[in-house]
Amino acid sequence: MTYKAHDAFVAPARARPGLWRLLFGLVLVAVVFVAWFMALVAAIYLVSGTGGGQQWMARLATANTPTSVLLILAAIPGLGLGAMLAVRLLHARSPATLFGRKRRVIRHFAIAAATALAILAASFLVPTGYALRAGLGLSLWLSFLPLALVTLVAQSGAEELLFRGYLQQQLAARFTSPLIWLLLPSLIFGAAHFDPGAPPGVSWMVAGAATVFGLCAADLTARTGSIGAAWGFHFANNVVAVLVVALNGNLSGLALYVTPFGAEAVETLQPLILRDIAVTLVIYAAIRFALARRNA
């Protein structure tokens, strides 16, 4: 598997590769994202009234209930909508070109998601030194599961459309060096996961772990010529982190289990984040192997 497939993936972006178009495109993405979020907020107030809307805004700030987590995740697809609108208006190309070939996207998504879920499940067999706490009750968890999976598909897909689709394609159309079109979107992706509310010893490591994931996803996209593998990897990772075992605190409302500590447990979290990075690299290598073996 080489970067030959990346040439075809980037080809539609080469017609209009100007950096000014990319910069205006990113501004448009931000505008669409904010508009999408405000539309969600307006819908909440419309359904719940002023008092109920204010209560929902307080729940969204912590996202420790199932519906509040779903609403937070539902805001992310605005990024993907913005990227699709940007390529249409500023680059005069079809939004479908952000994905790659349809059959390849679907096949690679399935292979990557299955591979990642299998390895993540196996990783829970490694002792951690702490006991997980029960989160959402099983029956309630199962009732939310179908909608949660659909939302996570949309959320992870929107982020891949922006970072591995739009950003990577347009930078590769303008610059030949992989150091730019692989590294820059990954650094931005990592920065987007920086949490200023967490202790620095945790927030910087989380951003670093997200950057490592971004590099793996960018490389898979370049080697396969679609966002399918990166999307499947991203989806599987978020399924485990949001639905199976979540860090106690924000975004824990949909998890079947939660950790007995939160982001304040710096000394406990740091080695766990390093372990997560190692698991990410193992999954990345396994997905590459699976795709190469199937000549996919």
Image (tube, grey):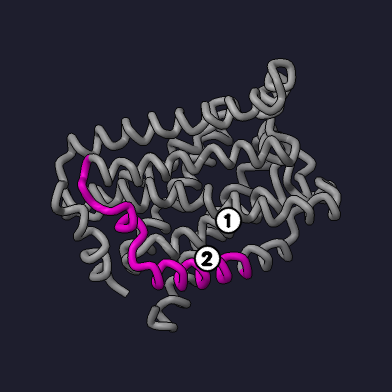
Vertical order, 119 against 185 (above or below) = below
Task: Report whether 15 appears left or right of 81.
Answer: left
Quadrant into which the C terminus falls: bottom left
Vertical order, 58 against 29 (above or below) = above
| Label 2 sits on residue | 283
**x then y, percent, for residue 89:** 25, 41
Image quadrant of residue 12? Answer: bottom left
Q: Is residue 265 visible?
A: no
Image quadrant of residue 21? Answer: top left
Q: For the point 81% across and 46% down, which residue is it? A: 135
- What amino acid type is highlighted by mark number 2? Ile
Local crowd size for mark 2, using a 10 Å CA cut-off: few (<14), some (14–19), many (≥20): many
The magenta stretch spans residue 111: yes
Residue occupying the far front of the picture? 46
**Nearest the camera: 36 or 295?**
36
| Label 1 sits on residue | 237
Q: Main secondary structure of the magenta part?
A: helix
- What amino acid type is highlighted by mark number 1? Asn
Task: Report whether 267 appears left or right of 109.
Answer: right
The magenta stretch spans residue 99: yes
Q: For the point 47% across and 64% down, which residue is it? A: 284
**x then y, percent, for residue 263:** 66, 34
Q: Is residue 187 visible?
A: yes
Q: For the point 63% across and 37% down, which residue is it? A: 71
Image quadrant of residue 55? Answer: top right
